[in-house]
Structures are given as C-alpha cells and as structure tokens.
Amino acid sequence: MLYPSIDVLLEKLDSKYTLVSVASRRARQLREKNNLLIEKPRSAKYVGKALEEIVTDKVSFESAILRPNKDKE
C-alpha cells in the first residue's frame, strides 16, 4: 500500500487538484532549496517527501477567494 494514502491526504486538502498543485510546488521547493520539514521521510523522491509533509501538517494551503469587483458594475 502506498504511503500516505490518498484518503488521508484528501482530508487535509479540499480536492485532488489542490493536492497535486500543493505537492508539486512543494516538491520543486525541496529540489531547489533542500529544506525538508520532516526528519525521516519514507520516500526518496521529492513528490513523496512533499506528500509526507502534507499528511503530517508541516505544509498547509490557504485558498484565495475571488470576488467580483463592485466598483465596475
């Protein structure tokens, strides 16, 4: 079985799209800066390490809400 489970990851974020976006962005950061937030990751790959950080709440995501500009109406 894969770790972390997709079911557990989706409890942390609102959609699969958000999960992929956050994990890929964090994996790029790990590749460039090598600033791992967990001590002993199970995965050797950057995306796996990013997913492990998400499941342990070391990485979070805040969504932007877009609202129409009332001045232009």
Image (tube, rainbow, N blue to C red):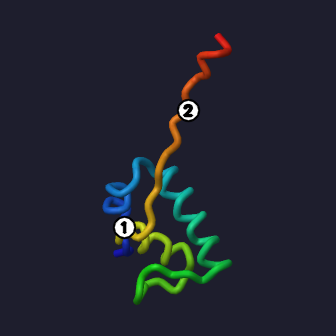
Sooner in the amino-acid sequence: mark 2 or mark 1:
1
Residue at screen point 37% across, 71% down: 4
Amino acid type of the residue that numbered disc 2 sits on in the rendered structure: Leu
Picture coordinates of residue 7, whole percent (x, y): 32, 59
Residue at screen point 41% across, 87% down: 39
Residue 56: which quarter of the image?
A: bottom left
> Badge 1: few (under 14), some or many (20 or more) residues near its Cα, within 10 Å?
few
Q: Is residue 40 above or below residue 5?
A: below
Picture coordinates of residue 30, whole percent (x, y): 59, 77
Q: Would you name the residue on which mark 2 appears? A: 66
Residue 33: which quarter of the image?
A: bottom right
Picture coordinates of residue 46, whole percent (x, y): 56, 78
Residue at screen point 68% across, 78% down: 32
Which residue is situated farthest in the bottom direction here?
Answer: 40
Q: Is residue 51 above or below residue 21?
A: below
Judged left or right of residue 4, residue 37 is: right
Q: Is residue 54 above or below residue 12?
A: below
Q: Nearer the viewer, residue 50 or 65?
A: 65
- Quarter of the picture holding the C terminus: top right
- Give the Cα separation between the discs numbered 2 and 1: 25 Å
- Circle 1 — which element? loop
Q: Would you name the residue on which mark 1 appears? A: 57
Residue at screen point 40% across, 53% down: 13
- Quarter of the picture holding the N terminus: bottom left
Amino acid type of the residue that numbered disc 1 sits on in the rendered structure: Asp
Q: Is residue 1 above or below residue 11?
A: below
Do labels 2 and 1 touch, CB within 8 Å? no
- Circle 2 — which element? loop
